[in-house]
Amino acid sequence: MKKIKKILAIIMCTCLLFSMVGCSKTENNVGLGYTAGTYTGVSKNGKNGPVKVEIKFSKDKIDSVKVTEHKETKGLTDSAIERIPSEVVENQSLNIDAISGATITCDAILEAVADCVKQANGDVEALKAKKVDKNVSNEVVEKRADVVIIGGGATGMSAAISSAQSGAESVIVLEKASSIGGNAIVSGGYFEYISAPDELRPENTEGYTQVIENILAIEPVDEVHADMQKELKKQYDEYLASGSTKVFDSTYLAALDYLQLESYSTPESMFGFATLLDDTANWLTEMGMTWKPLTGIVGYTWPRWSSPLEGYEGHGYFDLFNKTIEKNNYPVEIMTETPGKELIVEDGKVVGVVAKDSKGTEYRIRANKGVVIATGGFSANMEMVKKYNTMWESIEDVTATTNVGTMTGDGIVMAEKVGAQLALMDDIMLFPMADPFTSTTENIVGDDGDALFVNKEGKRFVNETLDRYTLSAAVLEQPDKMHYLISDNTNSLIKDGHTFNGYDVEEMIEGKQLFRADTLEDLAKQIGIDPEVFVATITKYNESAKNFKDEEFGRISFSKNSTIDEAPYYALPRVVARHITGGGLVRDDQYRVLNEKNEPIEGLYAGGEVTAGMSGISSFGDGMYIGKILFEK
Ligand SMILES: Cc1cc2nc3c(=O)[nH]c(=O)nc-3n(C[C@H](O)[C@H](O)[C@H](O)COP(=O)(O)OP(=O)(O)OC[C@H]3O[C@@H](n4cnc5c(N)ncnc54)[C@H](O)[C@@H]3O)c2cc1C
């Protein structure tokens, strides 16, 4: 009898054990069972670096999740930092949908959470598999506005403000990401401020004088070109007579300067572009924009680039736009996480847009005056880049992109479906100076408009002031398709332990994103280069910079700070990344999208990087003009 009791007890215990194991596998209780306590977890990389979280566990649940450290982009990833932790707690799950435009950040947060779960002896795989009630909506909402703008980046937000300023009574901006800004908000914010006041201009140098003389000496391609050169000469003579020591600039110089860079442009179109830049800078300044001193940037070395003095880089513009809308009570409704999906066409005319929010609600929005496509480029869409690329031999190797995740070419696809004409689609601009770990362009140490590039063999390989296509092609031919940007105490632009854009130098050094040494020999050793070769390269480069004469690569643009001769010395590893797409919708001078027969598609407008031949935050100008064209009488 005793024996039977014992066997029964064993059977019961075994059943209990099986049912407990089964319990941890049932849907509602997956992953339950932790070693209670507070844990810190860290991800490998978000967009700009690792994300750290702190989690409190009791023995059967996740009590709280908090992101304690991150370097993710302010604004664009705010909702990810806020929402993902609370959704993990609410659903007791790691099966959480990413937020559009912040996918990498969401993944990093979930990775850091998983790290904590593992430490607390939880079941990561079960939490990842746990189904979450997504609350899907089947609602359809009808709306109407004077203008519907698809995309709330540079073009979209300036079109919204300009429309309101010009008399629009209702403006709807559809934005795919969880906040406005697009690539423009993560950009360095560098805008070509041609008529900047003298106090923002650097001193003139022999190198700059030489550039102007070269532009004036070019054989003109047509009469317009010749007239522009004449006008520039007149302006330049006046400038010389004025005795100014500040660097010269004008719309004629900008137009002729860019004419050399853009193979498909004409002198007339470049003059139009330079005028747009000038009008836009004035419009922004009138709105209240204050500007930093002018500088050159990589690929565009004339010092005419400024960025917001207030607000962080590209953010400065959107801070100003938000303030302007609020202060003037402009009738602008911004619908975030609500991507435009298709255009509504009636009798051959575009009359509205269908959009869908993250809960599944469909919006059918009709536009009285027009629909504006402002969805930017498609560098974040590798499949689309591969589809159109004929420019680069091995685009598959360029896995990094500087873009935010929503830049997937949606506007091009939508417009193509209603018969829009596309052009320049194979114009894929790569950026030759992205961070190898995070793809960011913003943690530059050194002056990217006045740089020295050295490859893994310790040698220079290109005129660093050439355009980005040439520079990227040159980098892709170097060992490991990478290079180092070399700088010193005077041109590293480091201040108070931080880079020009505010990155912590010690953290970068710790993460091997930057190398620093008191001697050139030591710097060479740290990056695995033969010190003798490296020192010889720097010595030769310094000679070229001092004499404004670079016999090896023909560079003439050097500044007073170009030489590398004052410790500490820095080496910043850089790679090539997909950056800007030059192709897109064809439009006329009224910003109307054209069909294959070069006829306007009624009701459809477009501006910015989604259009053929336009890119950069000069797209603010497209938006500004679109608002005026649509609403000014
Ligand atoms: C890292 C980086 C640095 C840069 N630095 C500079 C710089 O210093 N100076 C410069 O001139 N240029 C710079 N650029 C380029 C510049 O940012 C872009 O060319 C410019 O922002 C293009 O403006 P846009 O309005 O066409 O697109 P964006 O400003 O990118 O805006 C497009 C918007 O459309 C949204 N969108 C996309 N699809 C949909 C959809 N289906 N529905 C609704 N919304 C949608 C996107 O989320 C985004 O908000 C930089 C780019 C990057 C990536």
Image (spheres, rainbow, N blue to C red):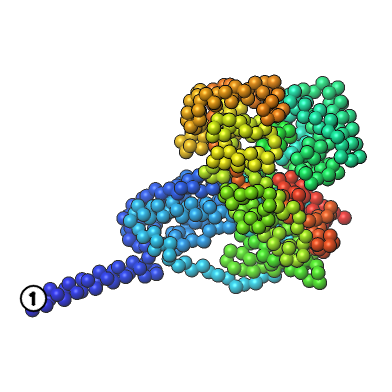
The residue that appears at 66% across and 57% down in the rendered structure is 387
What residue type is disc 1 on? Lys
What is the residue that sits farthest to the left in this orientation? 1
* Mark 1 sits near ligand 1, with its Cβ under 8 Å away: no
- State whether residue 299 is above or below residue 386: above
Residue 133's x, y, as percent? 48, 68
Q: Taking the image as drawn, is residue 178 in sight?
A: no
The residue that appears at 19% across and 74% down in the rendered structure is 11
Residue 457's x, y, as percent? 54, 32
Q: Quadrant of residue 486?
A: top right
Depth check, front residue: 463 or 512 = 463
Depth check, front residue: 69 or 286 = 69
The residue that appears at 36% across and 60% down in the rendered structure is 123
**Residue for badge 1:** 2
- State whether residue 392 is above or below residue 296: below
The residue that appears at 66% across and 30% down in the rendered structure is 450
- State whether residue 520 is above or below residue 297: above
**For this view, does 589 lie left or right of residue 9?**
right
Label 1: which secondary element: helix
The quadrant of the picture occupied by the N terminus is bottom left
Tag 1: Cα neighbours inside 10 Å, few (<14), some, or many (≥20)? few
**For this view, does 430 lie left or right of residue 437?**
right
Residue 518's x, y, as percent? 50, 23
How many callouts does the rendering have?
A: 1
Q: Quadrant of residue 340?
A: bottom right
Residue 296's x, y, as percent? 69, 34
Q: Quadrant of residue 600?
A: bottom right
The quadrant of the picture occupied by the C terminus is bottom right
Depth check, front residue: 398 or 311 = 398
